[in-house]
Image: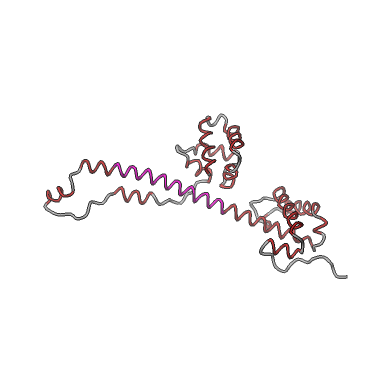
Amino acid sequence: MASSKIPRPSRQAKTLNELRQTMNIGLVEFHAFKISVRSLVGRFLNVNKTLEDQSNEARGRFFIKVLEDNKPLLERFEGHWPVEEYARTHLSKRIGHARWREREFLKRSARTNASTQHAMDGGQGSRSRDESMSLSPPPAEQSVRRGTQHSEAAPDPTAASSSVSAEPLPDIRSPIEIFLTSIRPDFVRFATVFNEIGVNSAESIQLLASCAADVRREFLRSNLAGKANPLEIFVINTHLDRL
């Protein structure tokens, strides 16, 4: 007697809607299935790894729990294949989004550092030009003195310096070091503390920044107590609020 269960498709679904249609279930039932699998992915699997990179033990415990919680639905499918299909798609999207957020964070930090450095170099260049103008005779007077006429002003070495410094160099620092360095004066001395409490990646920094201000302030106060004074904690919290 032929099996009445829905067989695994010959190719992986490219979209969630395609997966739902292949499973032949409604929107409400599919949504409940997604919520269940997502919550169990976070409990049993490493969300920074693909499904194929998970340990056999972790995958086994994950599949068993998903089947327990969704047995009536999954009994309709050969080998319970929707679990593997959705978990693989969900993990791949999480990893891709985390990488994108880290790239964007590094780009913003590089732009901020470049703008700050450019502004600082620009101010020094202006002072140098002012000083040279007050100490040197006018160009026309120099020409008469030398018996020649000059149509071009002498090149300004500070202009080249500003141009070079405005181009950001490749940054090999960790995201938390980049964030702490962006504070003026920089607080990079607290990088070790943040690493110890798990705030060390662009994703974890954004997660902390997204917390309510009072919750974030209490978290910083309790973890930085004895290592940072109240003003330093206030400054760090303010910069997180701006991300």
Report if residue 103 lies within the magenta region. yes
Q: How is the image coloured?
A: secondary structure
Q: Residue at x 18, y 54 (%)?
A: 150
Location of residue 85 in the rendering, given as x and y in whole percent from the top left corner:
71, 60
Q: Quadrant of residue 224?
A: top right
Q: How many marks?
A: 0
Q: Is residue 177 above or below residue 13?
A: above
Q: Nearer the viewer, residue 113 or 195?
A: 113
Q: Nearer the viewer, residue 96 or 177?
A: 96
Location of residue 55 in the rendering, given as x and y in whole percent from the top left corner:
70, 53
Location of residue 219 in the rendering, given as x and y in whole percent from the top left corner:
61, 35
Seen from this angle, which residue lies furthest bottom? 1
Seen from this angle, which residue lies furthest right? 1
Magenta-drawn segment: 100-127
* Magenta stretch prevailing secondary structure: helix
Q: Is residue 26 above or below residue 214?
A: below
Q: Is residue 98 above or below residue 15?
A: above
Compared across the picture, whether 25 is left or right of 104 comes to right
Location of residue 232 in the rendering, given as x and y in whole percent from the top left corner:
51, 33
Q: Residue at x 28, y 43 (%)?
A: 128
Compared across the picture, whether 42 is left or right of 223 comes to right
Quadrant in the picture for the N terminus: bottom right
Compared across the picture, whether 50 is left or right of 7 comes to left
Q: Residue at x 69, y 54 (%)?
A: 54
Q: Quadrant of residue 89?
A: bottom right
Q: Residue at x 56, y 29 (%)?
A: 226
